[in-house]
Image (cartoon, helix red, strand yellow):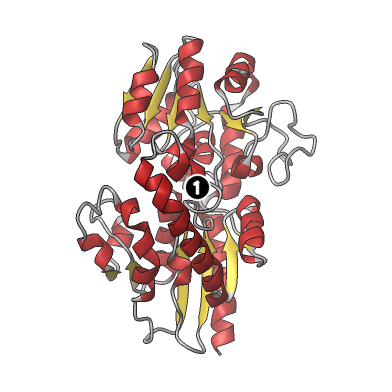
Amino acid sequence: MRGGEWCLDVFCELLPGATIFTLLHIPGRLSARIESMPIRTSFIGRLPGARTLHQRYLPLFPFAIERFDLSGYDFVLSSSHCVAKGAAAPAGRRHVCYCHTPMRYIWDFYDDYFAGPRAGLATKIVMPHVARYLRSWDVRTAERVHRFVANSAHVAGRIRRVYGRDAEIVHPPVDVSRFRADHARGDYFLVLSALVPYKRVEIAVRACTERRLPLVVAGRGPERAELQRIAGPTIRFEGWLREEEVADLLGRARALVFPGVEDFGIVPLEAMASGCPVIALRAGGALETVVDRGEAGGGGPAGAAASAAPTGVFFDRQDAESLGEALARFRPGDFDPAKLRAHATRFDRGVFRERILALLREEEARLG
């Protein structure tokens, strides 16, 4: 599962009597706890190709989320990276939004999705008008949320910029117990990511191809064919992997490469829980989790470098040259697997659970 789904798993643990409303659900991809909940879906899932190409129906998402009838519920908790925060709570009831990001397709990553070189002419003509409508809807429906909780300081800044609202910060959970830090290390670098434009996986592929470094790319998505086209012989691609296979790859990798600007980024923490250091772009949520070798114990980025031990290496420009320089600087001996794992425990599932439980108790008190 991805980061937002691990958050949802905790929400389901704490609210076992709740009903899940979602635009689209593909059974079998989520935890047993989530799958056991009552799940109600929208008409989006019945449209042609929705399971594999749901983004084509993006203009319909606001209409779909607003069609859900929540009138019989006392409290709404939305987990939103797109339109969930637009759900309307019944009159007099509270809506708390755990926000992974304001709708990334139309704000920070619009160009990556709709204006890049592989976007068709029709997309480039139509999407500016669609995006204008979606931005207006997104800002207007922020008023339906009584309390915003952001998954990172980075996202709290976006919420302030886009919606003009303040947000508390509760970092998402990493289940440290799923990983081991005592594996023998291999010689490969690892990218573990959805293969979509804004993840910028091509930077890692180009950097490792140019330097003839072994790189494993684990993930699936529409960018895979293009990534395979530009990859050299030292690059290996893996498709969908079971959780135990992911843990094994992380446990044996030389380092995780993390080239995108992420809202928060669970994967770097999963790497650290596996004793695996991280080579990350100096931007986004990585600033809250990665402690650069040169900044450890010295203040460093807010929220991360209070740790006495380094957990990774940053690169400053989002291009193959800058990443290549970081790969050349990287020395595995600078990192202690036990200390990497200890750093990850600051973000463990139990920490997240207690923060969300406290929030729910506050909301319960408001209900009287």
Left or right: 6 in relation to 330: left
Q: Read off the residue under disc 1.
A: 110
Image quarter for residue 231? top left
Q: Position of residue 352 (x, y in %)?
A: 54, 58
Image quarter for residue 293? top right
Q: Residue at x 54, y 81 (%)?
A: 364
> Is residue 286 positioned above or below 230 on the image?
below
Q: Amino acid at mark 1?
A: Tyr
* The one of 102 and 269 positioned closer to us in this rendering: 102
> Is residue 336 positioned above or below 196 on the image?
above
**Is any part of residue 245 visible from this angle?**
yes
Image quarter for residue 236? top left
Q: Position of residue 96 (x, y in %)?
A: 53, 72
> Is residue 208 positioned above or below 46 on the image?
above
Which image quarter is the C terminus in?
bottom right
Q: Residue at x 62, y 17 (%)?
A: 325
Q: Position of residue 304 (x, y in %)?
A: 68, 42
Question: Which type of secondary structure does the marked residue at label 1 adopt?
Answer: helix
Q: Residue at x 60, y 32 (%)?
A: 281
* The one of 326 and 363 positioned closer to us in this rendering: 326
Q: Position of residue 87 (x, y in %)?
A: 43, 73
